[in-house]
Image: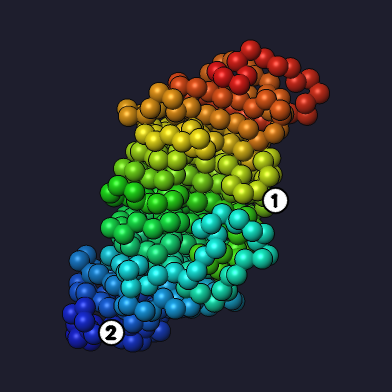
Amino acid sequence: MKPHIFAEVSDGKRDAAPVLQQALDRRGEIHIPKGNYLLGATLRVRSDTTIVAAPGSTFRLADGVGRHCRNFMITNANPGNGNANISLRGGLWDANNAGNPRGPDPGNGYFAVPLDELDFDLLAYTGVAINFTNVRNLTLRDFTVHNPSSFFVRVGEVYDFHIENITLSADTILPNQDGIHVGGFSERGVIRAIRATGVGVPNDDMVALNADDDVERQLNIGMRRGPIRNLLVENIAAEDAFTFIRMLSIASPIEDITVRGLRGGCRVHGINLNNWRFPKGVGAIRRVRFEDIELAKTRVNDSTTAIVKISLAIDDLEIRQLRRAKGTLPEVKTLVIDNHKNLNLRLDGQIHAIRSTGGFVLADRDIAELQLDSSSGDDVREPAGVGDA
């Protein structure tokens, strides 16, 4: 499509979605020149499409577009049967959460009544800005996402995917603003160079790997419970994140994950493997590596006292070079394990056998090297240091 066609709708006032959608429907490589593009509808990307937005290009979701669970700023065209070979690069994507509030979400009340008694609207707007579901060979890179009503970027059922050099920004802070949210059936991926700017951003997890989630909730409509495997997550930075890395598993496995290069400050946890509303000790998390972590935790309350929190079942965990950054309050624990499992723990050369009833707390020091494995419990003894090391 000729550049002057884009120029006619690049003033930020006219609805640019029809012209942009016409270009996307042609597939191939689509170059969008610098301009301000108002989106009066969701952009839907077919297979074998590469979108390259020029530096200085901005996209803003028009007021009232977020009415339905299939409304986003941009998504793949066929989440049911799947798409392949999609790439999105460049631009600032403003989801305009003030003009597009997400649908009612009883989950914000942490389920004071049973889940099956909550009044969910299964067609309501999720509040997700960028969404790709059921895609093979997906690349998302070199852009900024601004002011989502819930997640900045959400992917699920993605294979061979690459998410890199993404900036998260918001001047309206809302609950559940995950940065990069990965749902079930996602494998062989790289999430790299994700940064959040400003206080309170993101107001949930920088990177969430949620194999099992409340898929009935508004923000999770379209996601499925399933395995997450073979991911590299590296170079994640935030000034004031809620949590840096979140893993949530009940029965679906999270396996073969490497996380390295975490930098900045967090309000809740740096690494969060807690059970949320589920029983402690559920989960199937295996072969996870954390390396080169330097985080400050500057807030404390009764439920968020640790940089690393583990309440889910996990086997074969390694943490190497975790440092408490300047600004971390002395009462903040480095590590709390309370997953009701018998565990074998090697911490900086010392061996600890952890009873399921006792748990483990590392109070206020760095971790040079930690290895954690499950134990049959037949030879577990109560070692010195369990409960407060």
Picture coordinates of residue 268, whole percent (x, y) = 45, 40
**Residue farthest along the right direction in this orientation:** 378
**Marks 2 and 1, how far apart at CA:** 45 Å
Q: Return the residue at label 2.
A: 15
Q: Could you tell me which residue is drawn at 28 percent across and 49 percent down?
A: 198
Residue type marked 2: Asp
Nearest the camera: 277 or 227?
Answer: 277
Nearest the camera: 191 or 360?
Answer: 360
Give the quadrant of the C terminus: top right
Picture coordinates of residue 240, whole percent (x, y) = 34, 43
Res. 134 visible in picture: no
Where, by quadrant of the figure, is residue 19 drawn? bottom left
Q: Is residue 153 left or right of residue 272?
A: left
Picture coordinates of residue 51, whole percent (x, y) = 35, 72
| Up/down of 297 relative to 383, above or below | below
Picture coordinates of residue 245, whole percent (x, y) = 48, 44
| Up/down of 327 relative to 99, above or below | above
Secondary element at image label 2: strand
| Up/down of 364 relative to 205, above or below | above
Q: Is residue 93 left or right of residue 275?
A: left
> Label 2: few (<14), some or many (≥20) within 10 Å?
some
| Up/down of 192 relative to 331, above or below | below
Q: Could you tell me which residue is drawn at 68 percent across and 45 percent down?
A: 279
Give the quadrant of the N terminus: bottom left
Q: Return the residue at label 1.
A: 251
